[in-house]
Amino acid sequence: MYKKALITGITGQDGSYLTEFLLKKNYKVHGLVRRVALEDGNHRLWRLRHLLTRITLHPASLESYASLVKLIQKIKPHEVYHLGAQSYVDYSFKDEFSTLNTNINGTHYILSALKEFSPKTKFYFAGSSEMFGKVRQVPQSEKTPFYPRSVYGISKVAGYDLTRNYREAYNMFCCSGILFNHESPRRGFEFVTRKITHAVARIKFGLQNDLRLGNMDAKRDWGHAEDYVEAMWLMLNKKKPNDYVISTGKQYSVRDFAKLAFELVDLDYKKFIKIEKNLYRPSEVRSLLGDCRKAKKELKWKPKYDFKKLVQDMVKADLEFVEKEGY
Ligand code: NAP
Ligand code: GDD
């Protein structure tokens, strides 16, 4: 018997890799999308283009409990991967209201709909290392207290607590992955890694002269999205639900990332980067470093990519992208 999975945020970076992963495991994959995604598929479904004939997309709204109830009743999924969110930290300073609405209510509505109409469905919540914010401990594990530094981080702490509470109060199979930054050639262009690798390719092809960045001293624990979606599935396929930190355990600065990305095309990053104060955040998360020993031990999860391989993968893909698309 095949399993049915419902993915919210299927059009995003992780949604596309998770879809590929689940299709390989013979799942029937259903995705919740915003109606505009179906109306403007060429543009909005670019990460799923090669998978569209093998999955079912449903227009619905994370902001509408009724539409989520209908969807859950219709699909009766074995597993829900709730990845849909306003995921750009910087934007959450500019639009607190919609970030909180989508990220907290969206999570609450799905959990509540599952409790009423499909309580045996397993639920994955996309928690984040942003919840650690101004870190209270180095490295950060499942036991580290949270201290979010943005409305995005606050919304993820609320989602994490909702998920834990549904597990404890209603005995539902609910897990949170506390995932540290993970990147790939499918990363959105607004995030710093993709902004850098795309600029590197454009500079190499003579389409751009410089790259404007904010805080280059910020440090992150960067992994590859392809590795991280496997961890989501492993969590839902354990005997008991639990929360896990997923990270590489290695830390690099934005400067390290830029230096390596430019070096890969024989350029010196110092000649191209301009610092812009307006790209700094009102309250910055300066340093994140994960301790994922629990996931390694209990899920037998292990990343295949290291930092160098990740940067190489992204630069190579962006060189191909710019050469083909011309922008
Ligand atoms: P992403 O590429 O930005 O994708 C976000 C997805 O959420 C998109 O499919 C987007 O749909 C959907 N979405 C946003 N607002 C929505 C709304 N109002 N209604 C319905 N769908 C909405 O993010 P990602 O990197 O794949 O991350 C997936 C999840 O993991 C997110 O919850 C993110 O916060 C979390 N996370 C990510 C990382 C990371 O480093 N990547 C680390 C920790 C946690 P549209 O295409 O229609 O906009
Ligand atoms: N985006 C961006 N653009 N970030 C910049 C820039 C710039 O021009 N210059 C410096 N940075 C710094 C930011 O200040 C931040 O410290 C760091 O680069 C990483 O920024 P992002 O790539 O935007 O990612 P993030 O760490 O804020 O958030 C990502 O990771 C979280 C997990 O820790 C997102 O994927 C979140 O959804 C995710 O939860």
Image: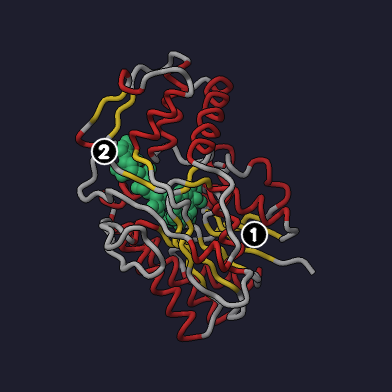
Where residue 110 sits in the image (x, y, percent)? Answer: 50, 71
Q: Is residue 73 left or right of residue 176?
A: right
Disc 2 + disc 1, Cβ < 8 Å? no
User: Along the polypeptide, which appears first: circle 2 or circle 1?
Assistant: 1
Q: Position of residue 313 (x, y in %)?
A: 55, 34
Residue 139: x and y, percent? 36, 58
Residue 73 location, quadrant: bottom right
Figure check: 288 above or below 277: below
| Amino acid type of the residue tagged 1 in the rendering | His
Is residue 86 visible in the rendered image? The answer is no
- SS of the residue at dot 1? strand
* Circle nearer the viewer, 2 or 1: 2
User: Which residue has dot 1 on it?
Assistant: 30
Which quarter of the image is occupied by the N terminus? bottom right
Marks 2 and 1, how far apart at CA:
39 Å
Q: Residue at x 53, y 68 (%)?
A: 68
Asked if one can make out residue 173 in the rendered structure from this viewpoint, the answer is: yes
Which quadrant of the structure image shows residue 275?
Answer: top left
Residue 215 has which mark?
2
Residue lying at 48% horizontally and 43% vertically, measured from the top left: 183
Q: Amino acid at mark 2?
A: Asn
Crowding near pointer 2: few (<14 within 10 Å), some, many (20+)? some
Residue furthest to the top in view is 206
Q: Nearer the viewer, residue 317 or 142?
A: 142
Vertical relation: 21 (above or below) 265: below
Residue at the farthest right position: 1
Q: Is mark 2 within 8 Å of ligand 2?
A: yes
Find numbered disc 2 in the image and state the secondary structure of the residue it sits on: loop
Q: Position of residue 12 (x, y in %)?
A: 52, 48
Q: Residue at x 60, y 62 (%)?
A: 300
